[in-house]
Structures are given as structure tokens and as C-alpha cells.
Amino acid sequence: MKCSCLCFLAILLLPAALLHAAEKGYATFAAATVHPLATQAALQAYEKGGNAIDAAVAAGLTLGVVDGHNSGIGGGCFFVIRAKDGTLTCIDGREMAPTQANRDMYVIDGKLDPEASRTGALASAVPGVLRAYERALQQHGKLSLAELLLPAAAIAEQGFPIDEVYARKLAATADKLKKFPASAALFFKADGSPLQRGDKLVQKDLAATYRAVAQHGTKWFYEGPYATQMEAWMHQNGGILTAADMASYVAKEREPVTASYRGYDIVAMPPPSSGGVHVAQILQIMEHFPIRDMPEASRVHVITEAMKLAFADRAHWLGDPDFVRVPRGLIDPAYAAELAEKINLNQPAPVKSHHMPPRWEGDIFGKHTTFLCTADAEGNWVALNQTLNTAFGSKVIVPGTGVLLNDEMDDFAVQPGVPNAFKLIGAEANAIAPGKRPLSSMSPTIIFKEGQPMLVTGAAGGPTIITQVLLLISNVIDRGLGPNAALQQPRFHHQWSPDELKIEKAFGTETLAELEKMGHALDRSSGFGSCQAILWDESRKLLIPAHDPRVPGLSIGR
Ligand code: GLY
């Protein structure tokens, strides 16, 4: 422990440029994802003449094949894009509640059926990924959606060996997946056991779906044979999602959340993600404390208290801005100063409920997940989060399509005050309504220094996404670490409710004991989350990509 303290002190004393110099960088392109085949697909798209936007879509489509328990075209996504001309674009490809959805659809005889929003026909909202990819490519890409779909289709057709994470999630959800014949046929062997690590997963139906979209465009999916087939299955299985819901889906462009932290500018995803708002809010509260110079336990304590305050606001204020009024005052620096005052440096302070941001009545936001990022030397940067929600989403594959459907309806507050799969509670702002998009924690973020992009990051892991992202940003900005070193730092997470501090054991017994002594209830973890990042190393003029050492993945460049 003493040795690691000294090493850490040595790290802090090194100038940032030297710390970055220890990490591998690339001159023209960089990508980081949770799967080598997806990262390679990004690089191949770039080498074919594409840019960072094309590369991100290539990686996203490939993840839908090789990491399909996390995301795919049956789910949703958010893009934050900085194009080479300096344009900032946030694309909301979040799923949308069906027209027949209603706020009490999971309450039967006054009793909530929590499984219904997570598994089966009623769990799915209208998927948004393909429409979002299309929009991103139309606005900023160089390659066509078809060109990016075909290599991913080839992987689906030929098959690939599933990795440890895939096999673990498959084993954990096997009982539920088995209930749906098309899912059972894909993921289980003849003897009924799930595929194991190293077994080949061949997805011929998904390959055919990708190829059909490549040939006929996204209309085939949203307004054609896929939508019809999906509606028929829903009808036979008690679902409410219709072909008309699919046809009405639009990927929306949203105004980015912008804020600053210690002279750096943050550009992030606005509602219906809570990510941008709360990453910005927590960082702005942290700005009132000398984070860099604080002893470890005090630093963890202060950031934890800031997390609690932000998550209490999240539970009350956040929802789809097309349906509810989300106050912009949540990211007002004056409000952050007010909240910072509530932090007691010596002990946890109870946070009974949300607070009242300034101008809350009038100044509002306009109208098991994965993260990947790409950047190129032309100045295109992409942060892309995509999800099916929990592992394998609703567990439903519509027969003949290979498409796993999301269970994003569970990201609504299915009953006010009742926790969802991530133990998050919500209020009226995130109640179900037809056409509404459920609140997300996905936090694709780009950080700028003097107007130039210098860091892109994001994460997977439900509400811990928000805290992983802000810790990565703080480790880079406050502690001067390169992205790989920053991702190695132990993490912690507090989401206000439940009142417990999830914290990695890697902090060591001394720090954990100190936090406990202060009064924190600890939930010790051997490791959580999955975060990626790319940093621009100004001194070497190189892009440094990094993926989370806690999970498989690959970061490469050229
Ligand atoms: N489905 C997880 C999230 O969007 O936050």
C-alpha cells in the first residue's frame, strides 16, 4: 500500500505531457470499443476512405453482431459528434414508447409486475439505432450505410467465437432466453445448454436482415417487411408494438449540454439522457474543491456527496424533454455553488430529496449498454453509446429476423418510487406515456480545450455510466493522467438511492476503512463498469485511445 502511495505521488508530480507520452498514440485515427472485431471494423471503415463517423457506425453495427447482448439494431443509441468543420451534433436514437403504452401498463390489480417491463413482448420500445446511424451518416459521413452493413453481415453469417463476457451473460439469462423459440434456437446447443466461451455463434437471420437493410434502406426495417413481421409476433404474444409505431420513429437532433470544468468545455448528451446534465452538474460541484490535492479518502468522500446531490435531482427532474420540463438551471454554476455548500467535508450529509435549480419553472431543455469512440486527424470526433438495456434486452428475437429486441421500457419509472433493474427510482417526469422516450444514463461526452477537442469518453453500466465518465474526466483533468492510466484508477459510485457507496476494493483497506469511519455505507466491488476514451496528446500530436482494463476490448489506431 505504501509503495502504491509513493508511485501515485510520483505520478502526480510528473507533468501531464510526460504521463501521456507513456501511452501509445496514433497520428491519423483512433478507435476504442469493447470488442476487437468492432474496433477492427472501425479501422477498416477508415482505411476504406471513411472518417470517424463512418468508423463509429461500422463499429456500432459490428457490436450488434458480436456483442449483441449489449446493443444492436433492436435497441437505441445516442451520438455526440464533433465534425471537422467544428459543428456539434447530438443525435437521439433513444427508443420510444409504443402508442398503446400507458403509465400503469405494468400494474395489475394495483400490483406492479416488475418482470413485464424487462422480459417479453411488453418490455420493448420502438428501436432507434438504425435511424440514428442513417442520420449521422447523412450529416457527417463519407460512406453509405450499405457499405458499413455488409462487413458486419459477413461476420454474422460466418460466425465468431463468443468471449467470456458473452458466455457469462448468456448463462445468467439462459432461463429467460429459453422462453422464446427464436432466442432458444440461436443461443443453445442441441443438448439444451447455452453456448460456452469459444463456441461459434452463427447468426444467419441477422446477416439476412443487415443485407436487406443494405439493399433496401432503413425503410425495409421501419416501414417494410421487418416492421410487419415484428407486429405479427407482437400480436400473437400479447405485445403492443405496431408497424405504425415503427414507421413513426424519428431520430431527433438535440441541442448539446454545454458546461465548463476548470477551463475545459464539456459537450454532452442532453435529455432524454440524464448523462450530460449530471456529469456536468457533478463536475461543477467538484470545481469548488481542490480535488487534485485532496487525500484519497477525502476526494472520494467529496465526489460521493456531489453524486448524491445530483442523483436526487435526477430522480425528480429528469425525463423526456418533449414531454416534461427539465430545468436548465440544473447545470447553472450558481446552483452548483449552492449545492457545494451543502457538502460536509468530514461526514456524509443526508440528502432527503431533490433541490430547486434556478428558473426551474421557465428555463427548460428543448425539445447493459456499450460505448465506443473514434477520432480522426481531420478533426472528426464521435462518442457513441448504444444499448438494449439489460443483457439480451427483452430476450425476444422476432423469429426469422435475428434481431434481439430491447427492454428499454424498464428505464421508465414503471411506478413512481419503485426501483428499476438498476435500483434507480424515478418520478412523474419519467412516467410512461405513448411516444415518450425513457430516461437514460448514457453519457457520451467530448471535452474541449481552447476550442479544440481533447478528450472523448463514455461508458456502459446503467447509472454508473455517469459516475465512470466524470471520474475519467477528473482523472485526466485534475490528476493529469493519460487515458489508459486514468481507466486503471479504482472507481466508486453513489446514486442517492439506495444510500450506499459502491466502491472498488482496489482502493485498499486503509481508504475503505477511512470512508467507513466517516459514515459511508460501503458496497465493496471487485470491479464495475466499462469505459473507453481517446485523448489528443498535444505535445506529440497523437490520438491516444484507451479501453477499460476491467473488460475485454481493443483500442487501436493508425
Ligand atoms: N439502458 C440504460 C440507460 O440507458 O441508461
Image (cartoon, rainbow, N blue to C red):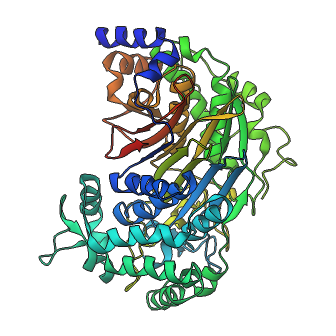
- Image location of residue 15, percent across then percent down: 51, 12
Question: Please, is residue 219 above or below residue 296 in the view?
Answer: below
Q: Is residue 229 above or below residue 39?
A: below
- The reply, left or right, for residue 223 in relation to residue 354 is left
Q: In the rendered image, which quarter contains the C terminus?
A: top left
Residue 383 left/right relative to 277: left
Using the image as rendered, state which of residue 341 and residue 191 is in the foreground.
191
Q: Specify the quadrant of the image occupied by residue 268.
A: top right
Q: Is residue 234 above or below residue 303?
A: below
* Residue most extreme to the left: 191
Residue 159 occupies which quadrant of the picture?
A: bottom left
Where residue 149 appears, x then y in whole percent?
46, 70
**Side (left or right) of 518 relative to 335:** left
Position above or below: 207 against 75: below
Which residue is found at the position 60% from the left and 61% from the top?
A: 142
Q: Quadrant of residue 96?
A: bottom right
Q: Residue at x 58, y 81 (%)?
A: 222
Of 449 and 111, the residue lying toward us: 449
- Return the residue nearer the eye: 204 or 276: 204
Query: Which quadrant: the N terminus?
Result: top left
Residue 46 appears at what percent x and percent y? Answer: 49, 54
Q: Residue at x 41, y 72 (%)?
A: 404
- Residue in the foreground of this view, choosing between 524 and 262: 262
**Residue 279 appears in the figure:** yes
